[in-house]
Image: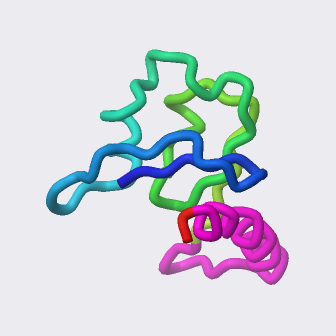
């Protein structure tokens, strides 16, 4: 299930439940087509499940956390940026609860 929340903890969109394993970004593309301009005026905060959103959707901005790789761990600065982004994204969890 996909949930979109604004910074005021208002739930703006809830998708239908999806059966089985389905990547978050694929659910988004299925429910809200990239061809439409849903997010053109929005600053988007997402987790790594939405990798590629910045390339397929028109948005003011898309903030994704830094991704570590097997051969290149995150720097302390990248870890701090991820922590700050995570603290902003927690609004979604709070709105759901």
The rendered magenta stretch, by its main secondary structure, is classed as helix
- The relative height of residue 73 versus residue 67 in the rendered view (above or below) is below
- The relative height of residue 30 versus residue 90 in the rendered view (above or below) is above
Q: How many marks?
A: 0
Point out the stretch of residues depicted in magenta.
Answer: 68-95
Most distant residue in the top direction: 36
Q: Residue at x 55, y 47 (%)?
A: 4
Quadrant in which the C terminus is drawn: bottom right
- The relative height of residue 80 versus residue 56 in the rendered view (above or below) is below
| In-image side of 65 versus 28 (left or right) | right
Q: Residue at x 60, y 77 (%)?
A: 72
- The x, y position of residue 57, in whole percent, is 54, 29
- The x, y position of residue 23, in whole percent, is 32, 55
Quadrant in which the N terminus is drawn: bottom left
Most distant residue in the left direction: 20
* Foreground of the two, 8 or 73: 8
Residue 56 on the magenta span: no
Q: Residue at x 69, y 64 (%)?
A: 91
| In-image side of 40 versus 36 (left or right) | right
- The x, y position of residue 53, in whole percent, is 53, 40
- The x, y position of residue 21, in whole percent, is 20, 62
The colouring scheme, among rainbow, by chain, secondary structure or one colour, is rainbow
| In-image side of 59 versus 51 (left or right) | right
Q: Residue at x 40, y 25 (%)?
A: 33
């Amino acid at each position: 299930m996909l949930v979109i929340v604004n910074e005021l903890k208002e739930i703006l969109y809830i998708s239908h439940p999806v059966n089985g394993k389905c990547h978050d970004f694929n659910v988004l593309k299925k429910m809200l087509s990239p061809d439409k301009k849903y997010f053109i005026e929005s600053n988007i905060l997402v987790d790594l499940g939405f990798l590629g959103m910045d390339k397929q959707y028109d948005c003011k901005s898309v903030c994704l956390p830094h991704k570590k790789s097997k051969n290149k761990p995150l720097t302390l600065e990248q870890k701090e940026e991820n922590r700050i982004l995570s603290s902003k994204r927690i609004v979604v969890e709070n709105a759901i609860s």
